[in-house]
């Protein structure tokens, strides 16, 4: 059964009391902390270069954030977008906000590497923590290339 089909569980997750992110105090695989959010990258990302921006304030919907927090979240999204674009040379970035599996506001960043024969920078392949890539090396590459302001 899907989490959102279990009314009691879904309500608890939406309130934050059973939200895995809130219970852990942060999401998994954090590579950077921004003004109102964390940037995460899964060990086995669904596509090369995939990152996720997770709100540090529990909310299910963007409109649930106070206006100044929502504006700051979008500023964080813009910062991630600019950094990923510059570091990867992606032809296009796609953004997705779902929340039907995990009701804690988060935004997915998906890189488009080919459009009508155009190709992105080959370094984009280094952004995947998939087969044959050491997690620490990828984390280091992403952190230093995309988010240098987080480095000591």
Image (spheres, rainbow, N blue to C red):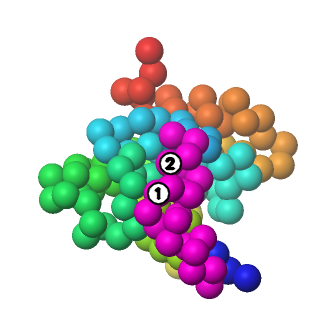
Residue lying at 64% horizontally and 75% vertically, measured from the top left: 3
* Neighbour tally class for label 1: few under 14, some 14-19, many 20 plus, Cα within 10 Å: some
Residue lying at 77% horizontally and 35% vertically, measured from the top left: 134
Q: CA distance from mark 2 to mark 1?
A: 6 Å
Q: Is residue 68 visible?
A: yes
Query: Is 44 situated left or right of 96 in this image?
Result: right
Which of 69 and 10 lies nearest the eye of the viewer? 10
Query: Is 75 situated left or right of 8 in this image?
Result: left
Q: Residue 22, labelled with which disc?
A: 2
CB atoms of marks 2 and 1 within 8 Å: yes
Which of 67 and 80 lies nearest the eye of the viewer? 67
Mark 2 or mark 1, earlier in chain: 1
- Residue 86's place in the image compared with 136, above or below, is below
Q: Is residue 91 visible?
A: no
Position of residue 89 measured from the top left corner of the image (x, y, whole percent): 46, 52
- Residue 109's place in the image compared with 76, above or below, is below
Quadrant of residue 94 in the image? bottom left
* Neighbour tally class for label 2: few under 14, some 14-19, many 20 plus, Cα within 10 Å: some
Q: Residue 123, labelled with which disc?
A: none
The residue under label 1 is: 16
Quadrant in which the C terminus appears: top left
Residue lying at 78% horizontally and 40% vertically, measured from the top left: 133
Q: Which residues are magenta?
A: 4-25
Query: Is 132 situated left or right of 40 in this image?
Result: right
Quadrant in which the N terminus appears: bottom right
Which of 121 and 60 lies nearest the eye of the viewer? 60
Position of residue 74 measured from the top left corner of the image (x, y, whole percent): 27, 56
Q: Secondary structure at mark 2?
A: helix
């Amino acid at each position: 059964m899907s989490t959102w089909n279990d009314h009691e569980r879904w309500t608890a997750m939406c309130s934050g009391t059973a939200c895995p992110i809130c219970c852990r105090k942060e999401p998994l695989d954090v590579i950077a902390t921004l003004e109102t959010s964390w940037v995460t990258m899964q060990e086995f990302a669904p596509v090369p270069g995939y990152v996720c921006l997770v709100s540090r304030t529990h909310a299910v919907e963007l409109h649930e954030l106070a206006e100044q927090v929502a504006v700051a979240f979008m500023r964080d999204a813009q910062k991630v977008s600019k950094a990923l674009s510059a570091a990867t040379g992606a032809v296009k970035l796609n953004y997705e906000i779902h929340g039907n599996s995990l009701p804690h506001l988060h935004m997915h960043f998906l890189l488009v590497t080919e459009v009508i024969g155009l190709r992105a920078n080959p370094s984009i392949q280094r952004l995947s923590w998939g087969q044959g890539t050491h997690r620490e090396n990828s984390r280091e590459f992403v952190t230093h290339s995309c988010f240098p302001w987080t480095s000591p």
